[in-house]
Image: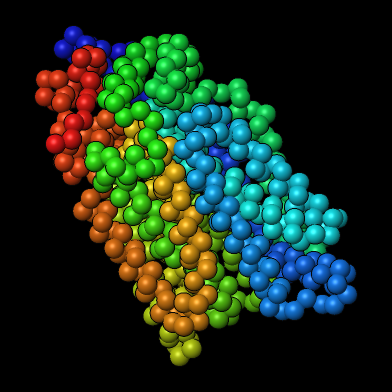
Amino acid sequence: MADTEEWGKPVERKGRLTVVLALATLIAAFGSSFQYGYNVSAVNSPSQFMQQFYNTTYTERYHSPMEENILTLLWSISVSMFPLGGFFGSLMVAPLANKLGRKGTLLFNNIFSIVPAIMMGVSEIAKSYEIIIVARFIVGICAGLSSTVVPMYLGEIAPKNLRGALCIVPELFITFGILCAQVLGLRNILGNSTGWTLMLGLTGIPAAIQLLLLPFFPESPRYMLIQNGDEQKTTKALQRLRGWDDVDSELLEMRQEDQSEKAEGHLSVFSLLAQRSLRWQLISIVVMMMGQQLSGVNAIYYYADIIYSSAGVRESDIQYVTVGTGAVNVFMSVIAVFIVEASGRRLLLLCGFGICCGASVLLTVALNLQETVTWMPYVSIASVIIYIIGHGMGPSPIPPVVGTEMFRQTARPAAFMVAGSVHWLSNFVVGLIFPFLERGLGPYSFIIFAVICLVTLIYIWLVVPETKEKTFLEVFQMFAKSNKVELNLGDGDLPPKGLKESPEDALKATPF
């Protein structure tokens, strides 16, 4: 599409999904995000066979069977090592993303997938359950890094009109990874006494593919220009990603962002917390990440088998129903990819949290009446499916997208480090306390999740703006009033949408 002239200046054309951009997105998401989802679910189906292995190994070593409380403790540790590793991985985001770049960090991160895949694959031969526990921690580090670096990388290589759709692709691959683990975990495939080690070891294959293919694709142009100052490589990368040679308008926008950030330099987490101009962006990403994990999605999955059982689903068929709910989750992620640019981020977040809130209340009522009303168990199943649809629409995929768009280049790694830490700590807390909540409150525990969804919805309604098709500087401007900073924009305003802006009109933020 040729450029057109308006007021004597070339109009910026919208980016398109080129082959290079599409392949870079798919390889980054499959090699990293897929593993996150896969490892979330990989230990669920074969858990009884893995625990048998724990017990058998212990008996062979110490010539007596493992006590039940010790087995429970070891299994809990095995499961919880994954989110704990994710937390430590999120703490590594800022230093690695600034030092190695976005693509470089993803390539380095494959170490934390291939090594534990080998460890888990040989654990039965080595007769060591300790290897599984350590490997779960290491692969958690991989997930902690990938869950933040992949959206960061995709957000920086995408044109602004495709940024939302491409930043949802990682969530699509997370849900696809969960579904693949559920399918492979069926008893007649790999979820049995002979196949579980192979199932755990398969997580290394996507990492190996990424390690082979991702080096052929560009590093983030914004990273190369703003943080490395290499305009020549930036230009070539943009030309490959966009599919045309004239990338001057996008380079200019990056230079303006660079100029507005020169006084800040690379922001650490502590300096980020002290930045008045980023205060409400940081609060917003923390609220959205907490809302995403504390909304009860993991508890819903935890409680689903009990709900299906009480509804009369045969125990042997529950695994197939679980796969069905996984497929619904994937379907909603696909829908989100296609509608996010049309509907906007804010609407999907509001609708998603609203649906989750209503489904949690409905589920509470249905679980309480399940024993007295014959058809109520089917309402319980419907509530679970409605909840998954709501979460897949907004709370799951959208927070990383908005997080990418709310922060400028030098602040983004530190911001994602904070967001990732909140994400994984919240995940860990839900997994730790939900069994106690369920034991003490029963079905009323879902009222807590309904309240969290409602509070998050109200916050988004009042504070979070729509960031669709906005440049990073335009989003920064939208938060300026809330942050109480003054923006000096040359002539007093940003240029008309789509027009080039002269370098002397670069955006600057000055605290009052």
Asked if residue 335 is positioned above or below residue 130 in the image, the reply reads above
Residue at 68 percent of width and 78 percent of height: 69
Asked if residue 510 is positioned above or below residue 501 in the image, the reply reads below
The reply to whether residue 178 is in sight is no
How many numbered discs, if any?
Answer: 0
Q: Quadrant of residue 228?
A: top left
Q: Quick one: which residue is furthest to the top in this view?
A: 8
- Using the image as rendered, state which of residue 275 and residue 133 is in the foreground: 275
- Residue 45 image point, x, y percent: 68, 64
Q: How is the image coloured?
A: rainbow
Q: Quadrant of residue 326?
A: bottom right
- Using the image as rendered, state which of residue 57 and residue 465 is in the foreground: 57
The reply to whether residue 268 is in sight is yes
Residue at 40 percent of width and 38 percent of height: 268
Question: In the image, is 121 to the left or to the right of 463?
Answer: right
- Residue 92 image point, x, y percent: 52, 42
Residue at 68 percent of width and 68 percent of height: 74
- Residue 18 image point, x, y percent: 48, 24
- Residue 420 image point, x, y percent: 46, 48
Q: Quick one: which residue is furthest to the left in this view?
A: 492
- Using the image as rendered, state which of residue 271 and residue 33 is in the foreground: 271
- Quadrant in which the C terminus appears: top left
Q: Quick one: which residue is furthest to the bottom in this view?
A: 372
Residue at 38 percent of width and 48 percent of height: 399
